[in-house]
Amino acid sequence: MTKPLSYSWLEIRERALISNIRAHRRLLDRGVKLLAVLKSNAYGHGLELTARVCERSHQVDMLGVAGLNEALTLKQEGINLPILVLSYFRPFISHDLITALSQKISFAIYEEEQLKALEQAAKKCGKVANVHLKLETGMARLGVSCEQAVIFLKRILSSPYLKLEGVATHFATAESQDHWFLNEQLNNFNNFLSKVKNLLPKDLYEHTACTAAITTSPKSQRNLVRLGIGLYGLWPSTNNKQMVQKNHPNFDLKPALTWKTQIIQIQNLPAKTPVGYDCSFVTKRPTVMATLPIGYWDGYDRKLSNRGSVIIHGTKCKIIGKICMNITMVDVTEIPNVKVGDEVVLLGKQKNEEITADEIATLTETINYEVVTRINPQLPRVLV
Ligand SMILES: *Cc1c(COP(=O)(O)O)cnc(C)c1O
C-alpha cells in the first residue's frame, strides 16, 4: 500500500467487511436476500470503496443509500448492483430520474409527488420505475400511514409506469432489549400485507430488518434485510451485543476502519506550562508533547479535549489541551524514542492497544454511528 498524501487517512480492511457480511448471512433464513446500507459515505468508510467490496464479495444482493445523488455517484463509478434509494430524491430534477430509471435504481416512496415525478420520467424514457412502498408502522419518521397505504398501493398498482418492487418499514427500537414495540410494528406491517394480499405481485420484496433486528428478531427478516452498522463491524448497541453474544456465541464482528495520522512536531515542556487554547491544561511535570495534524475539521470531536487518547508505538497517550480546528496535542512523555513522522492511531488498533468507536462515543456523549459518519469525507480512504 502506498501512503496517501494526506495528514490523516483511513484504512479500511476488506477482509473485515467480508467477514461481517458472512457473519450476518449465517443468521439469515434460506433465500433471504441482503441489502447493504451505504448511506452517509458508507458510514464514513467510503462510498465507492465499500460498494466495490460488496460487489466483489458476491454476498450482497442490493445496495441502499439515503439520497438519489449517492445512487447516481455509484452508477457513475460503474457499480452494477441494484440500488434502493431509502429516503429521498428531489422530484423536480427529472434528468436525474431518467438516468436513474435506466440503471437499476429503485425508490422508497411515501408521497404522491414522488409518484408523479417518477411516472413523468418513466413516460419520457419508455421505462418503468421500481418502487418500494415505505409504510409507517410506529417509527413516526417517514412513510405512508397504514390507513392511507391501501389507497396509495392501489394508485401504484394501477399505473403503467410504476412497478411495486417492495413494501418496507423501519423499526424505532430494534436496538433495545425489549422487543414489544418492534413486535407491535411488525404486527402492523403484517396486518397491512394480509389486507392487500390479493393485490400484491408474487415477486415482492418485504423488508423491515436493520442490523439489530437481523441478529435478534428472526421473524423480522422476511425476504430481504437491510444491513447497516453491522457491515462495518460495529454493534448497534450494548444491549444488542449482549443479546447476540448470548444466543450466538460464535457470532463475531470485526471493525473495518483504522484512522491514522503522523506526528508533526515534538516539544519538551517544563512543568507548569499551559497548553493550547484557553490554557485548559497545565503540565504537572516536565512533559514531552507531540503535535498531530488532526482537529475537529477532520471530524475529530472537540469533546475529546483533555479526555481522549491516541495510540503511539502501541501505547495510549492522553490528549492534552483543547483540540483545535486542525491540530491536537498529546502527552508522549512515556514513549521512548518517539519522533516526528511516527504513526498515530486515532481510532482502531495498533499492536495490543485499541481505541473503539464505542469508547469515543461514550466520551463524546453520542453513539458509534455518529463517530464514524462524522469523519470528514475529504480524508482519503484506502482499502487494505
Ligand atoms: C440506516 C438504515 C438502516 C440500517 O440501520 P443499521 O442500524 O445501521 O443496520 C436500515 N434501514 C433504513 C431505512 C435506514 O435508514
Image (tube, rainbow, N blue to C red):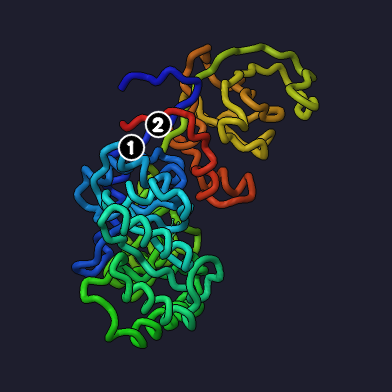
* Quarter location, residue 70: top left
Please name the amino acid that badge 1 sits on.
Answer: Leu
Lateral position of residue 378 relative to residue 29, left or right: right
Q: Residue 236 at x, y = what percent?
A: 46, 57
Query: Which of 233/50 is in front?
Result: 50
Asked if 322 appears above or below 159 in the picture, the reply is above
Q: CA distance from mark 1 to mark 2?
A: 8 Å
Image quarter hosting the N terminus: top left
Identify the residue shown where x is 25% and y is 53%.
60
Q: Callout 1: 10 Å neighbours few (<14), some, many (20+)? A: some
Residue at 40% x, 67% y: name it.
213
Q: Residue placed at 42% from the left, 81% from the top?
A: 151
Image position, residue 206 (x, y; %): 32, 71
Residue identified by numbered label 2 = 381
Depth check: give the residue in front, 128 or 348: 128
Task: State the mark number for residue 49.
Answer: 1
Q: Residue at x 27, y 86 (%)?
A: 198
Tell me, for residue 126, which label it has, or none: none
Asked if the residues shown at circle 1 and circle 2 are in contact, with their CB atoms under 8 angstroms apart, the answer is yes
Label 2 SS: strand
Is residue 123 depicted above or below 363 in this figure? Answer: below
Closer to us: 225 or 231: 225
Regarding residue 221, the answer to whether it shows in the image is no
Instruction: Specify few, some or many for label 2: CA neighbours under 10 Å numbering under 14, 14-19, or 20 or more.
Output: many
Q: Position of residue 99 (x, y in %)?
A: 32, 46
Residue at disc 2, CB closer than 8 Å to ligand 1: no
Whichever of callouts 1 and 2 sits on the residue coming sooner in the sequence is 1
